[in-house]
Amino acid sequence: MKTAFVTGATAGIGAATVRALHSGGWRVIATGRRTERLTALAEELDGSVLPLTLDITDAGALAALPESLPEGWREIDLLVNNAGLAIGQAPAQEAQLADWEATIAVNVLGTMRLIHAVLPGMVARRRGRIITVGSVAADYPYPGGNAYAASKGFEHVLMANLKADLIGTGVHSTIISPGLVGDTEFSDVRFGGDAERAAAVYADLDHLTPGDVAEAIAWVAARPDHVNINHLELMPNCQAPGPLVFRR
């Protein structure tokens, strides 16, 4: 049985991905900061999920992977970089620097450090897939996107360059860019826990669900070895890139 490592697995896309991969025959290392949620997920999926409490901003913990994992779980066949966040939606000139730094700590440094820790083992075994959950924000700028969109742009370019570096190694590299996804904690975090404001983002919209993105991740993970999906973008049918804006 192949082993997957999923970050941000305590809710939303991460938890849905653990369930989708489990249904597809994977055993999964489910990581996140909220131990009780990971434990409940492991109990729900009956034995083939290893809950691992992990803070994606803890550089030491990431550097210690995969050697710090239990015996039998160290050969990671699939890494899903799902953990990510955005804090604040103010225009750049009004944004708090601490919000930008917190966003970059997770989306850029966390993703980069985890790949750096896991990739050498994949190359040595000549097999593996790295899937990073990006965002359409990397390609379609919008007011207030600033550091979040830039961090997703970093992920997009990093994954494309991995593809160039990994030719001939047997390791695959994919960026999946969702549009508007509801039923997650993303907007709750972005708006500082203001549940009413967060809910208003998705009101009356037939948005993507975490399950939609998880199915895409599981599909990519199930491709035969000779196939690499470079970039997969998905949006709800109610969303499209906006027109150019003019202001007089």
Image (tube, rainbow, N blue to C red):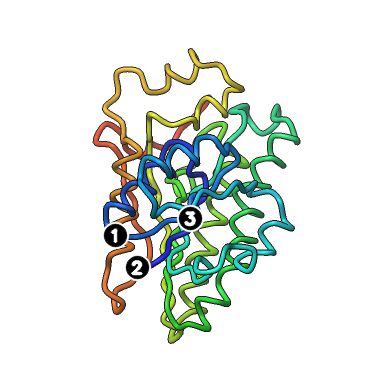
- Residue that badge 1 annotates: 25
C-alpha span from label 2 to label 1: 7 Å
Tell which of 192 and 46 is nearer to you: 46
Looking at the image, residue 133 sits to the left or right of residue 85; the answer is: left
Amino acid tagged 1:
Gly
Q: Residue at x 59, y 56 (%)?
A: 111
Q: Is residue 175 above or below residue 240?
A: below
Q: Residue at x 42, y 40 (%)?
A: 41
Query: Residue 79, percent across and down?
Result: 47, 61
Quadrant that contains the N terminus:
bottom left
- Residue that badge 2 annotates: 1
Secondary element at image label 1: loop
C-alpha span from label 3 to label 1: 13 Å
- Residue that badge 3 annotates: 29
**In the image, farthest residue toward the bottom:** 168
Q: Is residue 125 above or below residue 66?
A: below
Secondary element at image label 2: loop
Looking at the image, residue 155 sits to the left or right of residue 199; the answer is: right
Tell which of 93 and 214 is nearer to you: 214
Looking at the image, residue 103 sits to the left or right of residue 20; the answer is: right
Amino acid tagged 3:
Ile
